[in-house]
Amino acid sequence: MLPMTTHYTHRAAACMLAVALVLSISFLPRAVCDDRSSKTPLLIAHRGASGYAPEHTFASYELAIEQGADFIEQDLQLTKDGALICLHDPDLERTTNVSEIFPNRATVRDPEATGKPRRGWYTIDLTLDEIKKLDAGSWFNRANPFAAKQSYAGLRVPTLDETIKLVGDRAGLYIELKHFPFYKSLGFDVAQKLAAILNHHGFDKRPNRIFIQSFSKESLLRFRDLAPMYPRVQLLPMEDPGRAKDSATITAELATEISGYAQGAGPTKTMIKSAADVETLHGARLVIHPYTFRGSTTAVNRRPLEEKQPNGATLLQNIKDDIKRYIDFGIDGGFTDYPAIWKDVIRNPK
């Protein structure tokens, strides 16, 4: 499913044209003008089907497609020789065997601007050829023996270009610009590189297959200038200097600000307290895609779905209940590590 349907009522078409004139863009996310109640919330596979397979690998992306994802998320990092790769962390250590293959290549950097530089094996310090030597799957088997598969061992870190070719027309791409100021300080314009790749693959002619997301307002403004046809989503809270506190609460002022340069908001789901918060964002003509629906698990701490939780329910049931709750609030989609669970909730809402 894509964020723009092929048929509109006269009312919806007129509304879309008016907004396009105001925003000077050729794309309008679905569920902005027409009746949201008739729309199925988008299933966005967070780092692929990352609850079942190693995040940001072909295995995770393929499984997400099999489980019915409308969009698959790609986090972007940059290599020493300027290639865009799909990896969540700027440091390769958590999800690869980089410390074994290149034990002497660690450096001290602060890509997330914490003020506390940390020793690590950063993507920006290794070439693409070097990164392609790394095992990006075995860590998942070690961390999650209950979900381990022999086929995950030896998986490679994919480039964005490779991912685009793999996914094809089977799902949309939900791409995150990460650590924009860090890469900018090193002389790299990641937004420009991303726009060039998307245009090369013809997405400028079909931008409704793409969402561009970021915690950085600066990066979204840059991407708007480079490629205004692609819909942009501001993740919340913002990571721009001085914005962590005021962008951590949903207000009409924040919604209006975001609507000036983006078409959607992606708040951490804990920011959405009720349907009223969703209506505040909808009131600014934004789509809402909160993150992340995965229960009590995290990327580094998975648990069997059948495991009982402190409330007496299974992890599986808690994730289902959480998804149902936010869909009832009126969200337009959401990020989940477990696409199959989201799909089951949509098929069996009661």
Image (cartoon, helix red, strand yellow):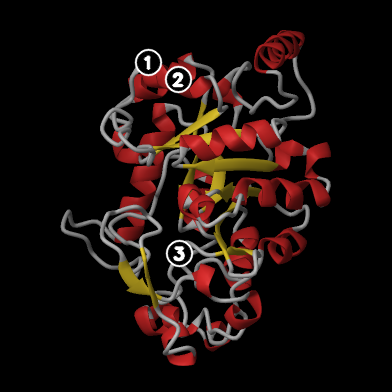
Q: Amino acid at mark 3?
A: Pro
Residue 41 in view (yes/no)? no
- Nearest-to-viewer mark from 3 and 1: 3
Residue 13 in view (yes/no)? yes
Give the distance between the C-alpha atoms of the residues marked 2 and 3, in whole angstroms: 29 Å
Q: Check the picture and name the quadrant holding the C terminus.
A: top left
Q: Amino acid at mark 1?
A: Glu
Above or below residue 24? Residue 130 is below
SS at badge 2: helix
Give the distance between the C-alpha atoms of the residues marked 3 and 1, in whole angstroms: 32 Å
Residue that carries the numbered disc 3 in the rendered image:
90
Above or below residue 19? Residue 114 is below
Marks 1 and 2: in contact by CB < 8 Å? yes
Q: Earlier in the sequence, mark 3 or mark 1?
A: 3
Q: Check the picture and name the quadrant holding the N terminus.
A: top right
Location of residue 250 in the rendering, given as x and y in whole percent from the top left corner: 33, 25
Q: Amino acid at mark 2?
A: Glu
Above or below residue 154? Residue 173 is above
Residue that carries the numbered disc 2 in the rendered image:
257
Location of residue 324 in the rendering, given as x and y in whole percent from the top left corner: 40, 39
SS at badge 1: helix
- Viewed as shown, does residue 219 lie left or right of 299? right
Residue that carries the numbered disc 1 in the rendered image:
253
